[in-house]
Image: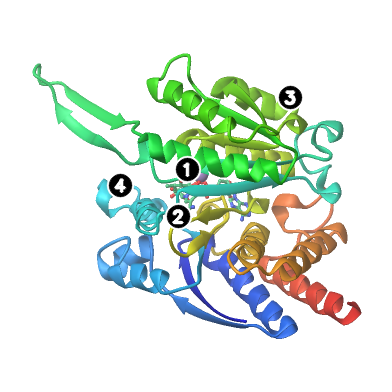
Amino acid sequence: MKKNIAVLRGDGVGKEVSKGAIEVLKTIGQQFGHEFHFQYGLIGGEAIDTEGTPLPQETVDVCKQSDAVLLGAVGGPKWDQNPAYLRPEKGLLQIRKALNLFANIRPVTTYNALTDISPLKQDIIEGVDFVIVRELTGGLYFGKPSGRSVDENGEETVVDTLQYKRSEMERIIYKAFEMAQTRRKKVTSVDKANVLESSRMWREVAEGISKEFPEVELEHMLVDNAAMQLIRYPKQFDVVVTENMFGDILSDEASMLTGSMGMLPSASLSSDGPSLYEPIHGSAPDIAGKNIANPIATILSAAMMLRLSFGMEKEAKAIERAVDQVISAGHRTADIQRAGKSPVQTTEIIDQIKAALIEDGAIS
Ligand code: NAD
Ligand code: IPM
Ligand code: MN
């Protein structure tokens, strides 16, 4: 198969980890006879520095013409004092909106080889397998009005608006039920319905959609309780669906079940065009440029691309097997290495995953 992949490497470790995904995709292409064509676009801080905007129109065009988009990460201290419209993160929000990436799918699975890396006890994390379905183009991130003003007494005032249309809630909750139908048939809808009107509407919508899926159990959970339950007994979850910001926070928390932010991939699915694949982590300025970042979250995001955008299940599984094999053999970057063992560098682990893929191909 022939596929065009847009690559937005972004800033900080975004560049280092996206290199891993590209190399792994090239290896898959050679092994399975696919032609992956990569086209690069600027986003984030680098785009601000060179083009004066966090998301140049050319980047949007490259993405729209592609079959799928791979993204590293954006942001960094250099741009932290910039006004809102000139922040790297704005570029990410704008590309999500431009491509209608309403459904951010963040699977959380644990690896037997990493049970001693997670700060949680082995019996709590063993066998954890759930997916966070995060709404990605609404809520506090996009609601209007947003900004600062001065009130009638001359005091500085600020507002961010949590805004949703019913149809935006419907499509994401529907997606969660569809996914649960193919899994363990349980949806946990997370909200703050004891306080927020938006959450009360969210609950209503979830109840309505659940009638179309009689085999799927629906439970509602308040977000503060959900944050606690994730740590207390994560095996209770199958599909967790929630609004944009709750999903953002809960997924970083959930990464600690696996053991590191460097392990969690994601797919941002579009309603009408190419989808985008990105790790859940950021540009990690504290470790950027040192060749120590874990590229696995991005490599697993590439596996999600193969599965969900290209229907290449065998190829996706091959990547997941290679990753499992490499970490099981003890080759790990610093974030997931055992105490007393020396970590491998980003470029080394990429080479090892490629080698495992080639070896695997030779056997099958
Ligand atoms: P972060 O996710 O970049 O880093 C949080 C912690 O996790 C850091 O200690 C970092 O070293 C570690 N970490 C993250 N990715 C890792 C990896 N692959 N391997 C090993 N360790 C890893 O979050 P932050 O520090 O809060 O934010 C830094 C910048 O990234 C900010 O500018 C923020 O806006 C941006 N950000 C971007 C995205 C994105 O592009 N999708 C996501 C989150 C944060
Ligand atoms: C993520 C990030 C982004 C978000 C930021 C950088 C805008 O934290 O992808 O999880 O909050 O969605
Ligand atoms: Mn986040």
Location of mark 3 (residue): 232
Q: Is residue 349 left or right of residue 251?
A: right
Q: Position of residue 51 (x, y in %)?
A: 27, 69
- Tell me the amino acid under the disc marked 4: Gln
Location of mark 2 (residue): 271
- Tell me the amino acid under the disc marked 3: Arg
Q: What residue do we see at 15% from left, 21% from top?
A: 155
Q: Is residue 357 left or right of residue 221?
A: right
- Tell me the amino acid under the disc marked 1: Arg
Tell me how far mark 3 sits from mark 1, CA to CA: 30 Å
Which of pointers 3 and 2 indicates the residue nearer the eye? 2
Tell me how far mark 4 sits from mark 2, CA to CA: 34 Å
Tell me how far mark 1 sits from mark 2, CA to CA: 9 Å
- Does 111 appear above or below 62? above
**Which element is circle 2 on?**
loop
Location of mark 1 (residue): 171
Q: Is mark 2 within 8 Å of ligand 2?
A: no
Tell me how far mark 4 sits from mark 1, CA to CA: 36 Å
- Tell me the amino acid under the disc marked 2: Ser
